[in-house]
Amino acid sequence: MRLIQPNKLRHMLYVQRGGYVVLPLLIMLLLSATAMVLPVLEIDVKPFSIWAQHASWLPPRDPGMAQLLLGAIAGSCITVVSVVYSVLLIALTFASIQFSPRVLNTFVKDTVSQVTLGVFIGTFAYCLVLLPSVHGPPHATVPSLSLTLALVLAASCLFYLVYFIHHIAIAIQVNIIVDRVARETELALRGRFGGPLRRSPVQEPALVEPTAGKNIPSYMSGYVQYIDENKLLSIAVSADATIFIHRWTGQFIPAGAPCFTVTPASAATKPLVRSALACFHIGPVRSLEDDVEFGVLQLVDIALKAMSPAVNDPSTAISCIDQLSSVLLLAATLEPPKTILLDANDKPRIFRRQTSFTRLLEVAFNQIIRHSGGDMPVSLRMLRALHDVSGVTTCLPYLTAIRSMSQKVAHACTAHYSPEACEELLERLSIIETRQRTS
């Protein structure tokens, strides 16, 4: 059986993408190493020194001027770093208040911001490390190529400063934020779901929690961010056991609550429990790496805040609904994840609850319906989104769920408007119902 699951290496790379530490630190270390190596090559390697003298005509030859130049570049860079951090904090605060605190992770993982900080801090470190290589009389030494690189880095800092301000001005626009969240959600969706849906998904039996076996409690409280299911499957196969996962990705689990159950109980040895618990990565916040519903909830949060009386911005809510339709359309065309993982002999080994198209449909629209009954444009856009999604699938269970959701939208809206004002709404509902009946 083909498993489309994230591996541990991908999880590590995903975790390291976030924050303003790893990438800026790597850039700083790279430039610091360059500042240590390049002057040695210029001084000790004769062919390289001759080439460097001819290639570097821009920097000053006087040691005092060279030291002054490096000090000016270093001081300017570390001053601008505080400005960059201030702009970042303002952007994060604005996004948290205006849209949703959950979208902050999208800003923190922004590569442009990380590279900008890295270039400024790296240039500062480069100039400081290079300063001792410049000597005055009687043995004057001016590594001209190294100074040229310092000037190039200074010019790069100016470019990145302008580009960073331009990037932040665009990044805090709601349509850009909503689009970025939707694209990350689609990426997680492709990783969690399977290939193209060829036929109606097989109805799997409802999961029943085991009455036998040994319950293994969680070692800490937090949200399940990622489960290394490939490793967990190999553990179950090697022990000739089955593992029932009680909390799936995105759910909160308190310390001491059952994390999984091993059957038979005799298979739950200490090495197995230790290895199996290591497959569960738990943290204080939900992650979009493998949690499709979290991405949908971010879009829903932005839509709900936009529809609140304090904001009253239905256009933003409509943008969120448009992106939700894109996510749901993709989910309707992909093979849903299996709740039971089999080994090479088709024997059930891992039992876990999984999200599905129907579940995503409910998460996407249930809350918006409750808050948009009196808003005709938002209700019309939801029906158009449901109409678009119904047009890409012939799966009867999917169409039935779409029809039910469409009826909820229409019922919530018609309670606030006259029949004449609801003609277009009811027309779109009729088209969706016709598609469900003819499938």
Image (tube, grey):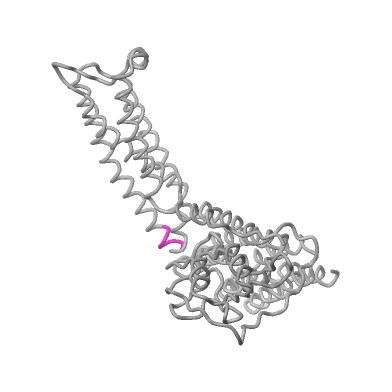
**Residue in view at x 35 percent, y 12 percent:** 54
Residue 328 drawn at (x, y percent): 66, 62
Quadrant for the C terminus, please. Answer: bottom right
- Residue 99 in the magenta stretch? The answer is yes
Residue 391 drawn at (x, y percent): 77, 61
- Residue 294 in the magenta stretch? The answer is no
Left or right, 73 with reference to 282: left
Residue 306 drawn at (x, y percent): 50, 65
Magenta region, mostly helix, strand or loop? helix
**Residue in view at x 28 percent, y 21 percent:** 143
**Residue in view at x 44 percent, y 44 percent:** 112
- Give the extent of the magenta segment: 95-100
**Residue in view at x 29 percent, y 41 percent:** 80
Residue 1 drawn at (x, y percent): 72, 62
> Above or below — where is 295 with respect to 69?
below
> Above or below — where is 300 with respect to 261?
above
The answer to which of 421 and 7 lies nearer the viewer is 7
> Above or below — where is 167 with respect to 232?
above
Residue at the extreme left of the image, as rendered: 138
The answer to which of 409 and 146 lies nearer the viewer is 146
Left or right, 115 with reference to 235: left
The answer to which of 235 and 98 lies nearer the viewer is 235
Displayed quadrant of residue 405: bottom right
